[in-house]
Image (cartoon, rainbow, N blue to C red):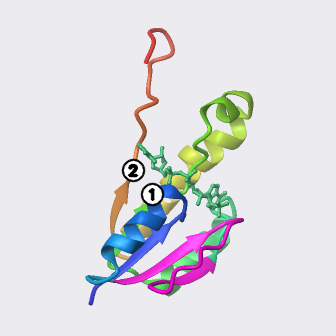
Amino acid sequence: MDKLLIIGTGLLGSRIIEMASEEFEIVNTYNKNPVDLQSTVSHQLDITNQTMTFKLIKELNPDYTIHTAAHTGVDYCEVHGSEAYSVNVTEARNVSETSGEIGAKLVYISTDYIFDGAKGR
Ligand SMILES: NC(=O)c1ccc[n+]([C@@H]2O[C@H](COP(=O)([O-])OP(=O)(O)OC[C@H]3O[C@@H](n4cnc5c(N)ncnc54)[C@H](OP(=O)(O)O)[C@@H]3O)[C@@H](O)[C@H]2O)c1
């Protein structure tokens, strides 16, 4: 079985684990909220800790990574811009680069809350 790493196990990550568990060996990460799912092996990871992020991805050595860790509260992100940028941009890029280094294919889930700063959504 190919190994699938789910980074972030919120609404989307948990559902993917449920759906993909028969076809993949699944490992996942959570930050503050562990999940109680039998079909995965969980690891705690704060992706703003770049050293741990690089280390864990390399140790787990997945064939595929689905990156679902994000600050998803739009209002929170508006107020905490640098924190949101760190998790949603800088660390997403680090996950992407590390996945590339080990040859894992990466799936990144974007958002429909995208606008150019001038016009509305
Ligand atoms: N749900 C949707 O309908 C939908 C639609 C379009 C796009 N998306 C995109 O899909 C992605 C996931 O959405 P979601 O609905 O699953 O969000 P969610 O339920 O809020 O889950 C976000 C996850 O990110 C993790 N996370 C936050 N900060 C972290 C950090 N510093 N280190 C590690 N993990 C961290 C959280 O971990 P802990 O809880 O363990 O702290 C949580 O598991 C987002 O990029 C979102 O924009 C979702």
Q: Name which residue lies at 73% across and 34% down.
A: 80
Q: Quadrant of residue 10?
A: bottom right
The residue tagged 1 is: 12
> Which badge, 2 or 1, comes first in the chain's sequence?
1
Look at the image and tell me in which quarter the N terminus lies. Answer: bottom left
Asked if disc 2 is less than 8 Å from ligand 1, the answer is yes
Q: Is residue 71 left or right of residue 3?
A: right
**Circle number at residue 89:** none
Q: Residue 54 location in percent, x, y?
A: 56, 72
105 left or right, relative to 66: left
Q: Is residue 78 at least partly visible in the picture?
A: yes
From the image, tell me which residue sits under label 2.
Answer: 109
Q: Is residue 27 magenta?
A: yes
Residue under the point 44% across and 21% down: 115
The magenta-colored residue range is 25-43
User: Decide: marks 2, 1 in contact (CB < 8 A)?
Assistant: yes
Amino acid on which the number 1 mark rests in the picture: Leu
Distance between mark 2 and mark 1 Cα atoms? 9 Å
Q: Residues within 10 Å of mark 1 (few under 14, many from 20)?
A: some
